[in-house]
Amino acid sequence: MARSRSSSSSSSSSSSSDDSDHGKQSWWKRTLQKKKKSKSNNDNNGSSSSQLSSAGRAARNALLLGAVQSILPVSNTPDHNTMPSTETSPLLNGNGAQGPSNEANAKKRGIVWGALTALFAGALILILGFPDTFANVFGPWLGLIPSDPALAALAILDRAPVIDGHIDLPILVRFEYRNNATAIDLGSRMPAHVDIPRLRKGKVGGFFWSVYVQCPDSKIADKDFLNPTWRVRDTLEQIDVSKLLIEKYPETFRLALSAADIDAAIATGKIASLIGVEGGHQLGNSLAVLRQYHALGVRYVTLTHTCHNAFADSCGFEPGIIPLHHGLSPLGVTLVEEMNRLGVLVDLSHTSDDTAKHAIKVSKAPVIWSHSSARAVHNVPRNVPDDVLALIGKGENQTDAVVMVNFAPFFVATPGNANVSAVADHVEHIANVAGKAYVGIGSDYDGIGEVPVGLEDVSKYPALIAELYSRGWTKYELGGLTGGNLLRVLRKAEAVAHELQGAGTLPKFDIYDKRTDL
Ligand SMILES: [Zn+2]
């Protein structure tokens, strides 16, 4: 960094060592020596600014010393030699008269000690007599978690904000605003579940912006996925509008490409903004498209949406979809390998159970479910069955992963029964089968028409945390649920990519075998 230097101190030697520590030290030394010399000679022609700053320092010291003397028991015979005789301060008795000053100091000390004693006694009564009130009122100041679940949730989220695996704001923007980022005011109330005031109220520290576009229209779709669609164009448009909105609110959002970026965003009070592609049908059957999505910032790809694609089978939406590949296709295996090499998370929401099991076997990196709940709690194909949850964990033949629970009422409970407690049941079931370190939050806000009672929008995450806190989850376990578990998985996926690239693993150039143009 450039800094100014007085002309009298400039020399060829000082300018040549300007940026070294040695240069800085000698420059400061020379400046100090000059000041000392000027003071000792009482040189009236010396720098007026130097005199002013010396007088200012003395006055400041006098004020500080006076303030300290007024509240602390100090010697009654201050050494006036330490202060210049010309200095005066309303807080110091400069004429040496001791009587009134001593009396005043004694009075002040009495008041201070009295107040401290009263405070101590009050705190003791509060701690012993009303421990809950004490924890609720003073807990946050002392790093404790309040006992009241609602307050506890807020205290926990202050330290471990939500990182949601799946928010569909971009598709809302496409449908409602034709992707015109300038027409959107995220600072005001948005029509569905997400806007900045509610993100802040819900204590959100980050989320994946889903750049979803729907499966090809049934009139266009063919069994070999060869009919051209606009899905790659549409995905690029969704990436574009996501980035425009992230850039439009630099005080709120920060594009995040890594776990370190998420940490940095949260540390500066920003909402880490990651990008996820929701379906292999958005890849145009091409690994090159995957690489370019990664270059644009995409950090997960859901292997399927509700349709099968050239890479993998979907679970569909309603039960009964007929399998095509019975898991991953050969190109799907290569896709997972290339995702591992790049550091793009393999997302298994929407996939068939066979696809999930196959991908877990193939993937060298941990996998995620960006927005899926537990099938044993509510039996729909979109939820993760127990035999797949059993594959997650630390044991032999188990994989690290995070299942981020979806809030969509249709996936949570029978009609009319989706509420905070029902969503918490899904969290707890996944925790019981896989472990508390393997569950997260993937609300699907802005992508779902209805919402559970008590979890109406992004401002309501604290209600879920409060519910689980009241069920006995610790602050550490809840910190994992809100984002820590996802961060661990993302870091591991980054480490795998680093390792593969370090080992010289080459990009994959497999071509979809039904293509005839290449
Ligand atoms: Zn979805």
Image: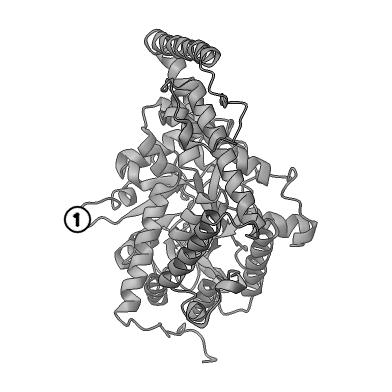
Picture residue at 41% right of the left edge, 56% below the top: 368
Q: Locate residue 458, reporting x and y percent.
A: 60, 41
Residue sitting at the far bottom: 518
Tag 1: Cα neighbours inside 10 Å, few (<14), some, or many (≥20)? few
Q: Do we see residue 19 in this rendering? A: yes
The part of the image, by quadrant, that contains residue 452 is top right
- Residue shown at 42% from the left, 28% from the top: 142
Q: Nearer the viewer, residue 250 or 173?
A: 250
Identify which residue is drawn at 42% across, 20% down.
73
In the image, residue 9 lies at what x, y percent?
55, 72
Camera-side residue of 60 and 488: 60
Up the image or down, 432 lies above or below 398; here it is: above
Task: Name the element at disc 1.
Answer: loop
Does 175 sit left or right of 371 as displayed?
right
Report which quarter residue 398 is drawn in. Answer: bottom left
- At label 1, the amino acid type is Glu
- Residue 105 position, x and y percent, is 50, 16
Give the answer, above or below, for where 68 lies relative to 166.
above
- Image height check: is 268 above or below 78? below
Colour setup of the view: one colour
Please give the residue where the numbered disc 1 appears in the rendered image: 396
Is residue 327 shown left or right of residue 68?
left
Question: What is the residue that sits farthest to the left in this orientation?
Answer: 396
- On-image quarter of the N terminus: bottom right
Q: Nearer the viewer, residue 413 or 430?
A: 430
x 41%, y 71%: residue = 22
- Residue 294 position, x and y percent, is 51, 72
